[in-house]
Amino acid sequence: MDPVEKGGNPYGLVIAPATAGLITKGDLVVCNFNDGATNTQGDGTTIVGLHPVAGAAAYHIAQSAQLKGCNALAMLPDDSISAAAFISSLNPLVAPDGTVNNPFAADTFSATWGEAFAAAAGTQPAALYVSNAGTGTIDRITLNGDVPTAFTEIAKGFCVSGGPGAVFAQAGLTYDGSIDTLYIVDTSSYSVVAFAGVSAIAADGVVVNGSCGATTPTPALAFTGPSASSARVIASGGQFNAPISAALLSDGDLVVGNGDINNPATPNLLFEISPALGFVGAPLQLDTSGTPGALFGIVATVDTQGNEIIYFNDDNTNTVNMLSH
């Protein structure tokens, strides 16, 4: 697909669930971490859309200083776009017509860094999960439609360090509604963490002991707190090199991309992770240029024939690409 316009370093990536406003169901929605004029890390303020066909040109959805440092997106059923904005430390909600709102202004964020939406199920209300690279915390925003009804910090203690271009923090938030589990890619410890029964985790229910230090990867994670038993590491080490992004496959496995902050010998690897078994098979190198740091936003879906489709941002080429099998 064509290079993403009016910005650079495409980070956030999500698939539109409906047709509304400027957006067509199935479109890819992307936010840019860098600005278009100078390509400065973290200065991006734009969200664009792409029809999921080869050669598609990006169309403008929104631009605002509230989106500065946008790095992760989640979409609500009405196509409202929830955006993690690292530099502004906000979590704006962008309407399908491109209007940028801030319904979570009463809540405090710190270097907002990860984003996942959980649909309502039974008596469980819809919610957004948001991670903060400034404080090592994860928040849950309970929703009634687009309106927040509660704000709870459910986890704290993740190790955080670095700045734009080399952020070590809890990222790649991915929610599996079939088992009410939130997955977190912990860039600092080179691991993937699962929070089972996440909708029931109360305030600071999980306290992470990352033994934070000056070097990475930081030591293996340990968990305390009232909901410590719900947290576990499902994959760590191996060829992980500052993993940063993830997407949920139809069989419940995850695909996880390296951030390559520490310049590995084989950069830009994508891994399949089974929550039960850990690493599955050999990793796949998606960008073969030899330049590390290509992979950020990743999202997966299934086409009408039942084939798994994975879309991923390539920051080296400023494009969105498709992988199918």
Image: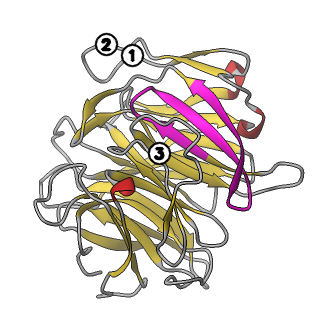
Label 2, label 1: how far apart the Cα atoms are: 9 Å
| Residue occupying image coordinates x 12% and y 53% | 291
Q: Indicate the quadrant containing the N terminus: top left, top right, bottom left or bottom right.
A: bottom left
Q: Quadrant of residue 47?
A: bottom left
- Give residue 219's mark: 1
Q: Is residue 136 magenta?
A: yes
Q: Earlier in the sequence, mark 2 or mark 1?
A: 2
Q: Is residue 49 magenta?
A: no
- Which amino acid type is shown beneath numbered disc 1? Pro
Q: Nearer the viewer, mark 2 or mark 1?
A: 2
Is there a contact, CB below 8 Å, between mark 2 and mark 3? no
Local SS, label 1: loop
169 vs 33, left or right, is: right
Is there a contact, CB below 8 Å, between mark 2 and mark 1? yes
Residue 275 visible in the snapshot: no
Residue under circle 3?
Answer: 114
| Residue occupying image coordinates x 44% and y 26% | 135
What segment carries the magenta color? Answer: 129-155
Label 3, label 1: how far apart the Cα atoms are: 22 Å
Q: Residues within 10 Å of mark 2 (few under 14, many from 20)?
A: few
Q: Earlier in the sequence, mark 2 or mark 3?
A: 3
